[in-house]
Amino acid sequence: MKKSLTVRDIVIAGVLGAVAILLGVTRLGYIPVPTAAGNATIMHIPAIIGGIMQGPVVGLIVGAIFGISSFLNATVPLFKDPLVAIFPRLFIGIVAWLVYVGLRRTNEYLAIGVSAFLGTLTNTILVLTMAVLRHYLTAGVALTVGLTNGIPEAIVGTIITLAVVLGWKQIGKNKKSKISEDL
């Protein structure tokens, strides 16, 4: 594991953090789904991507940016509490990284997919657990939201993360582009 942040780590954390903020502020981070909650969020995906691509520190930084943005833009009391809005988000990229590192030698696609799925569930489970512990939701309501909304979010998050990470890993593999061949 790296001992310090590189310029690349800082830049990627900043860009992914900006994407997380943009998804929240513009509401593009909410995908309508046919569940009681009505929307699946994808705002946690940059933290997962940061964890998979650059490691746990970048994943933690992007998760913190996502959490702080969620806290600052909160419209409901639940997310005006930093223990609900910020604290759980710190673990999204860390869990994604741990799972990815544990599985990447087995199969790259599986490692990315399971990392994305479990990173998403980390967000859902920890936010709902904190909401229950802080008395914003009852355990029954949290369980219902977790099952009806958490699973669709995890599926959507896995698909998007696989597409982005696999695409990112393809960048730079070809020394020449097709455009340069035409010149």
Image (tube, rainbow, N blue to C red):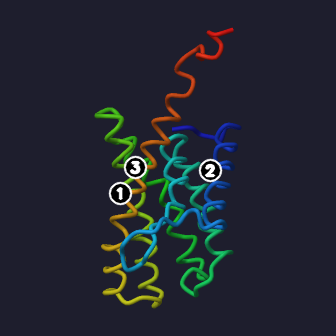
Relative horizontal placement of residue 168, taking residue 40 as reference (left or right): right
Q: CA distance from mark 3 to mark 1?
A: 6 Å
Q: Secondary structure at mark 3?
A: helix
- Residue under the image location 37 percent in, 68 percent down: 150
Q: Which residue is mark 3?
A: 159
Residue 70 spot, x, y in % from top left: 61, 71
Relative horizontal placement of residue 176, taking residue 125 as reference (left or right): right
- Going by the numbered disc 2, the residue's amino acid type is Leu
Residue 173 spot, x, y in % from top left: 52, 21
Q: Which of the labelled discs sits on residue 155, or is there none?
A: 1
Q: Earlier in the sequence, mark 2 or mark 1?
A: 2
Q: Which of the labelled discs sits on residue 97, or is there none?
A: none
Residue 71 spot, x, y in % from top left: 63, 75
Residue 12 spot, x, y in % from top left: 64, 43
Q: Secondary structure at mark 2?
A: helix
Q: Which residue is mark 2?
A: 16
